[in-house]
């Protein structure tokens, strides 16, 4: 059986091209052994004929930066007479139509994209875009990542293809092959430039037996079934079912003695498997005695199945939905199909497995082809087109993926128990956080029964897609709106049971894992009926550890109700679900949230990695009004090294009578961290209100959801998104505590999200924090140089310094020399004066203990060299005074100026009179006037 290293489909669909031929990227060889001198990109027109390439553009993207490094306008070019077109190295044979220098096509993580729109839109150094996208391959040569953004933009829902260098000896290429119906994928194979790809369907021994060839008889011709050998599967039985009655027509034990080249052939009597009727062929584990003739269709899931419909005959919905859920039956006819050749002869229909899909129970992998018993199948070159995207105008739609990386599928809504006995309104709704159309390739849903802790139904969703809003619905066939994958009525059990969602590209999760599978688990919901919670303990322990099963309580709402995701997007989190009105394929209608708790802040934080002391424990202490209900608050922890949130704890319960609530790995904690999780060395702790919103450190949280934060990280992006004072953080100072564990404690309640409110201290969970005290104060007298240009511009006025809260900068200056935990809290008893950009600090500085006091005294007596220019050798206390002294000085200066002005006026008058002669005429008039006045 051919193993696909990875599947990569162009899955976003706007225009589905089925009957008309199209242009696709057929093969890529980006990495040659030693020197890259035979690189190439092969395009193929599915008409198999000569076709014009006018209007097409080929763009090569570099995954390092996600920008274009090569753009080729294909205007004026044509495919050859067989539909092939090559772009490649000059040493290539056959010679490419467009020649490239050696080592042009990068090895990955990269992408090659075919567009069909104006070539003027594309140029080198441009950012990656999906505008006008027709086809794309995103690839890398190692499993180290780096192509996530390219894959999300160009092939959403599918990871980048990994070209395994060890898959083949010598050179290998990435070749496109038809998976099933009109769905395509890629596999590693020997290079075949200008030739049809070597798309070999599964052959030889496999883990799970699959049907490889069928002959549906007609008249006197017996039927024929060929399947792969799977020794590990145990005894097998082949069952033929009637398409009208859903009953067993014949059952045959599959004998391993008939093995030939890893294939098993079985002849079926001519009275069954008639090509002019409808029916099914299924392979089960077991014996023929388990499926007696005339017995009804078993609800046990087959290993593989093929359902067919003759001309004018249609199998029952129950047969199709049970054996091949979500697939279409194979329609037998005499017409020429778009992707197969009709080999209907007098002897019946000959069908071969030609699609290279690794999943089973899909008639879409079969084409009509010549019968080759015991030999590899002879499959024609497909003539269908993959689902493709063409955006003729407008701008690119923005990505809606959450920035923290949790971008995989989630169970969004679950309705397992509908009113009435019919149970024909059951459904399971999935949702992709991108809110866009995404492929469900490799996704499985397993329905577990708590009675035996085994899946009673396994459903492959490969080949399906979400809606344009990211929803996918599977449910009863009478459900409105119609589900994409229909199930027989009363399929989903009422509980105690579970629904689990997996990513498992190489078969059902239960095939490779014993017990309850957990590898590849994306999300799970364990649910129950009243009084049945204990019966689901094993399912809960494996799928949703530490949580009680959900109860879909029929008494909560009149009529029908569902379990709806309402409280966040964390997988395996049952607290996110609420009983609400059913809303299939629509936004959930959730209960109104409780009012957000007020006055709750982060009070103390400790990491288990900050010291090696035996008592060092990780915890987060909250403080708030006693008995405050914490519902709706979420505590998250961000790890700088891993660049993501590592803990997300929805808080439960209430603040205690003393005003404390502790989460972590300490004795008496109200909640513990998830197993294996702790507070990192560098990161952030965030408290937010998250009943209906995302709460992830490192994201742009709104002020309405973000309640408090402590950043102990140098990550500038984290600081800018979380801290009100950008570029500021609190780093634990281990020297502040002598030979003991260390925590960060809040010592000022007045300003949330301010680093000035915190200090390093000894841990005190559930007790009053240790904060700087005047009992351990010491005297300082420092003259500091200009710490910033802004200080120098505001020389002589220290009020702006205090009001602007730049005291923290003085504290930082001291802390850089002390490393003993000094913050603005320590300078509450200090005085400031400044002028000409110099700052004097004198008075008392507080401390936590005698040990820290000694460190501060040692720092205050440090005398850096004058070359540093930031500390005066002799404090200039006579030149710089406080703000009050400065005001008195200003008043005194005004008085002096007024006195000087008066003295100046008197001197001016004196000298003026002496220099001018006397006017005797005026004097005479004055004397006469005086005589008249005397009269």
Image (cartoon, rainbow, N blue to C red):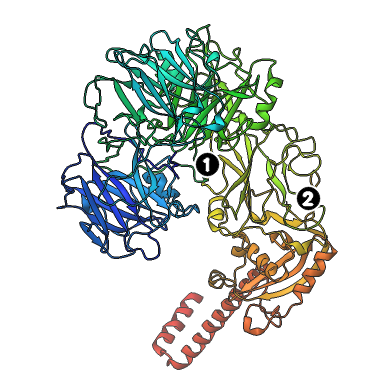
Q: CA distance from mark 1 to mark 2?
A: 36 Å
Which label number is shown at residue 406? 1
Decide if residue 148 is in sight here: yes
Residue at (30, 35) in percent of width and height: 14
Q: Earlier in the sequence, mark 1 or mark 2?
A: 1
Where does the N terminus fall, quadrant-wise?
top left
Nearer the camera: disc 1 or disc 2:
1
Where residue 610 appears, as percent x and y from the top left, is 73, 57
Q: Is residue 237 above or below residue 515?
A: above
Where residue 116 appears, as percent x and y from the top left, is 23, 45
The secondary structure type at the circle numbered 1 is: loop
Residue at (30, 37) in percent of width and height: 386
Residue count near mark 1 (Cα–Cα under 10 Å), binned few <14, some 14–19, many ≥20:
some
Q: Is residue 653 left or right of residue 345?
A: right
Residue situated in front as seen by the camera: 598 or 508:
508
Decide if residue 481 is in sight here: no
The secondary structure type at the circle numbered 2 is: loop
């Amino acid at each position: 059986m051919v193993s696909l290293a990875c599947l990569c489909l162009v899955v976003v669909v706007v225009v589905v091209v089925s009957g008309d031929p199209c242009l696709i990227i057929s093969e890529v060889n980006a990495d040659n052994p030693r020197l890259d001198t035979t690189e190439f990109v092969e395009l193929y027109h599915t008409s198999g004929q000569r076709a014009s390439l006018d209007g097409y553009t080929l763009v090569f993207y570099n995954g390092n930066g996600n920008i274009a490094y090569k753009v080729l306008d294909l205007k004026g070019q044509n495919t050859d007479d067989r539909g092939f077109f090559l772009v490649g190295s000059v040493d290539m044979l056959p010679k490419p139509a467009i020649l490239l220098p050696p080592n042009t096509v990068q090895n990955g993580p990269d992408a090659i994209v075919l567009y069909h729109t104006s070539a003027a839109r594309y140029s080198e150094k441009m950012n990656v875009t999906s505008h006008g996208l027709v086809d794309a391959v995103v690839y890398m040569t190692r499993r180290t990542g780096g192509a996530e953004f390219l894959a999300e933009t160009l092939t959403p829902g599918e990871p980048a293809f990994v070209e395994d260098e060890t898959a083949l000896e010598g050179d290998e290429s990435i070749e496109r092959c038809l998976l099933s119906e009109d769905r395509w994928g890629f596999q590693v194979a020997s290079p075949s430039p200008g030739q049809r790809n070597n798309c070999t369907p599964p052959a030889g021994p496999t883990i799970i037996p699959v049907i490889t060839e069928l002959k549906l008889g007609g008249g006197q011709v017996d039927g024929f079934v060929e399947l792969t050998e799977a020794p590990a599967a145990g005894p097998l039985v082949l069952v033929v079912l009637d398409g009208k009655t859903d009953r067993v027509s014949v059952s045959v034990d599959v004998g391993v003695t008939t093995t030939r080249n890893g294939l098993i052939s079985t002849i079926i009597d001519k009275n069954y498997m008639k090509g002019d009727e409808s029916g099914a062929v299924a392979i089960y584990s077991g014996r023929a005695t388990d499926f007696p003739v005339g017995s009804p269709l078993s609800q046990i899931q087959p290993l593989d199945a093929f359902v067919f419909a003759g001309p004018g005959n249609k199998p029952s919905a129950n047969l199709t939905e049970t054996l091949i859920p979500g697939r279409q039956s194979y329609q037998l006819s005499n017409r020429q199909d778009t992707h197969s050749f009709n080999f209907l002869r007098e002897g019946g229909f000959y069908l071969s497995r030609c699609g290279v899909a690794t999943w089973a129970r899909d008639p879409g992998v079969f084409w009509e082809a010549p019968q080759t018993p015991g030999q590899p199948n002879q499959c024609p070159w497909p003539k269908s087109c993959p689902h493709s995207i063409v955006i003729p105008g407008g701008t690119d739609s923005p990505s809606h993926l959450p920035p923290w990386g949790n971008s995989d599928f989630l169970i969004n809504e679950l309705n397992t128990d509908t009113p009435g006995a019919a149970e024909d309104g059951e459904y399971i709704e999935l949702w992709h956080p991108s809110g866009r159309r995404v492929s469900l390739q490799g996704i499985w849903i397993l329905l577990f029964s708590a009675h035996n802790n085994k899946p009673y139904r396994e459903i492959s969703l490969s080949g399906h897609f979400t809606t344009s809003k990211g929803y996918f619905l599977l449910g009863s066939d009478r459900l409105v709106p119609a589900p994409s994958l229909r199930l027989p009525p009363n399929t989903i059990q009422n509980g105690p049971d579970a629904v689990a969602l997996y990513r498992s590209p190489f078969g059902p999760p239960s095939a490779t894992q014993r017990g309850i599978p957990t590898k590849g688990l994306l999300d799970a919901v364990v649910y129950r009926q009243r009084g049945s919670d204990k019966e689901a303990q094993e399912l809960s322990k494996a799928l949703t550890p530490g949580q009680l099963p959900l109860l879909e309580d029929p008494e909560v709402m009149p009529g029908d109700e569902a379990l709806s995701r309402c409280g966040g997007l964390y997988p395996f989190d049952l607290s996110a679900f609420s009983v609400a009105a059913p809303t299939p394929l629509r936004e959930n209608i959730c209960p109104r949230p409780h009012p957000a708790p007020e006055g709750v802040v982060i009070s103390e934080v400790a990491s288990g990695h900050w010291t090696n002391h035996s008592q060092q424990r990780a915890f987060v202490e909250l403080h708030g009004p006693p008995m405050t209900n914490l519902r709706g608050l979420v505590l998250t922890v961000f790890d700088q090294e891993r660049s993501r949130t590592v803990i997300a704890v929805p808080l439960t319960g209430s603040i205690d009578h003393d005003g404390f609530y502790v989460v972590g790995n300490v004795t008496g904690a109200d909640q513990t961290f998830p197993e294996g999780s702790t507070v990192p060395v560098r990161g952030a702790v965030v408290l937010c209100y998250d009943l209906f919103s995302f709460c992830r450190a490192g994201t742009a949280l709104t002020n309405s959801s973000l309640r408090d934060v402590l950043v102990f990280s140098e990550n500038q992006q984290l600081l800018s998104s979380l801290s009100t004072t950008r570029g500021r953080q609190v780093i634990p100072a281990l020297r502040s505590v002598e030979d003991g564990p260390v925590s960060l404690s809040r010592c000022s309640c007045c300003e949330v999200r301010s680093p000035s409110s915190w200090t390093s201290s000894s841990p005190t969970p559930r007790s009053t924090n240790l904060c700087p005290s005047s009992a351990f104060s010491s005297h300082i007298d420092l003259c500091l140089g200009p710490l910033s240009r802004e200080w120098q511009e505001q020389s002589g006025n220290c009020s702006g310094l205090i009001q602007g809260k730049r005291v923290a900068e003085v504290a930082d200056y001291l802390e850089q020399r002390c490393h003993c935990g000094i913050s603005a809290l320590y300078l509450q008893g200090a005085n400031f004066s400044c002028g000409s950009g110099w700052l004097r600090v004198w008075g008392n500085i507080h401390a936590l203990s005698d040990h820290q006091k000694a460190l501060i005294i040692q720092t205050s007596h440090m005398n850096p060299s004058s070359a540093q220019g930031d500390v005066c050798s002799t404090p200039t206390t006579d030149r710089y005074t406080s703000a009050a002294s400065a005001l008195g000085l200003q008043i005194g200066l005004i008085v002096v100026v007024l006195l000087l002005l008066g003295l100046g006026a008197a001197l001016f008058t004196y000298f003026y009179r002496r220099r001018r002669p006397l006017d005797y005429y005026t004097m005479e008039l004055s004397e006469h006037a005086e005589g008249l006045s005397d009269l």
